[in-house]
Image (spheres, rainbow, N blue to C red):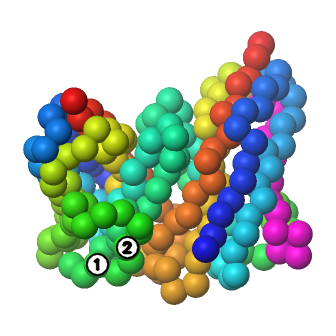
């Protein structure tokens, strides 16, 4: 099967940089996605890595290393509104739109 | 473009009852996936529909079922409700459901409470 592990909580201060890690176990996959969810609302797509390396989208960057079965989401210039839960998710081969999610990391941004 | 809509937003049922939840995807999207979110189990995949056919199914009992209509709108049904079915039910739509980097757009969810 497929499984993903993330830290349950991370705390950082406004203006800082924070990294949220995701390790996974899978026999094969298309790529690793990251989603943000505020207080039980709709998860929203942040970033996707199909290949090893860094993908940058504004203040958010995501990294993937297939050899290490590891990825991370990097949030820069943290703002209070970044306080939310962040999920990594795998999309598998021949799995259509199915996503396997990690348990999520709750990020608290302090002033 | 309007986003994914789900109805109802909140629902209270009692054990043994059944419930039907509805999801309207973004216009033009043909794939609809359903997820159950609970504090203990996180986001778990229920099933995916594409062109009115169930394409993938998660590890949930047969009490959970769904369908998709020709206009891509989808419904999921839970029969013989149990307390453990209390959760936020999310649907997500995507253009083709090809997976990979294709963005999934989530609705606001239906919060179901089973008493």
Q: Nearer the viewer, mark 2 or mark 1?
A: 2
Mark 1, other Cα within 10 Å: few <14 / some 14–19 / many ≥20: some
Residue B54's disc number: 1
Considering every residue shown, the one lying at the far top of the view is A111
Residue B108 lies, with reference to residue B56, above or below; the image says above
Position of B26 compared to B63: left or right?
Answer: right
The residue sitting at 83% across, 74% down in the picture is: A66
Identify the chain of the residue marked 2, using the numbered disc in the image: B
The residue sitting at 13% across, 44% down in the picture is: B16
Position of A108 compared to B114: left or right?
Answer: right
The reply to whether the magenta stretch includes residue B71 is: no
Location of residue A101 in the rendering, given as x and y in whole percent from the top left corner = 58, 57
Residue A15 location, quadrant: top right
Position of A4 compared to B76: left or right?
Answer: right
Location of residue A39 in the rendering, given as x and y in whole percent from the top left corner = 50, 30
Range shown magenta? A66-78
Residue at label 2?
B57
Q: Are marks 2 and 1 in contact (CB under 8 Å)?
A: yes
The residue sitting at 35% across, 55% down in the picture is: B91
Q: Examine the rendering and report whether any part of residue B37 can be seen.
A: yes
Label 2 and label 1: CA atoms lie apart by: 7 Å
The residue sitting at 44% across, 36% down in the picture is: A41
Q: Nearer the viewer, residue B7 or B58?
A: B58
Q: Quadrant of the N terminus of chain B?
A: bottom left
Q: Secondary structure at mark 2?
A: strand
Location of residue B87 in the rendering, given as x and y in whole percent from the top left corner = 36, 40
Q: Secondary structure at mark 1?
A: strand
Q: Examine the rendering and report whether any part of residue A59 can be seen.
A: no
Mark 2, other Cα within 10 Å: few <14 / some 14–19 / many ≥20: some
Residue A3 lies, with reference to residue A15, above or below; the image says below
């Amino acid at each position: 099967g497929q499984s993903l592990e993330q830290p349950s909580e991370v705390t950082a201060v406004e203006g800082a940089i924070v990294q949220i890690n995701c390790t996974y176990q899978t026999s094969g996959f298309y790529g690793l996605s990251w989603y943000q969810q505020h207080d039980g609302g709709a998860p929203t797509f942040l970033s996707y890595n199909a290949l090893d390396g860094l993908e940058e989208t504004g203040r958010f960057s995501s990294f993937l290393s297939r050899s290490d079965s590891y990825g991370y989401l990097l949030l820069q210039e943290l703002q209070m509104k970044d306080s939310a839960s962040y999920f990594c998710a795998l999309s598998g081969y021949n799995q259509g739109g199915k996503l396997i999610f990690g348990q999520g990391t709750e990020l608290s941004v302090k002033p | 473009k309007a986003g994914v809509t789900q109805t109802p937003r909140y629902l209270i049922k009692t054990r043994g009852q059944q419930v039907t939840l509805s999801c309207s995807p973004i216009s033009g999207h043909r794939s609809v996936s359903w997820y159950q979110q609970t504090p203990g189990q996180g986001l778990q995949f229920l099933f995916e529909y594409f062109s009115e056919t169930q394409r993938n199914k998660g590890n949930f009992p047969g009490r959970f079922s769904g369908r998709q209509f020709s206009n891509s709108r989808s419904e999921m049904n839970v029969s013989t409700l149990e307390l453990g079915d209390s959760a936020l039910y999310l649907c997500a739509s995507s253009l083709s459901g090809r997976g990979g980097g294709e963005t999934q757009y989530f609705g606001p969810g239906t919060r179901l409470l089973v008493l």
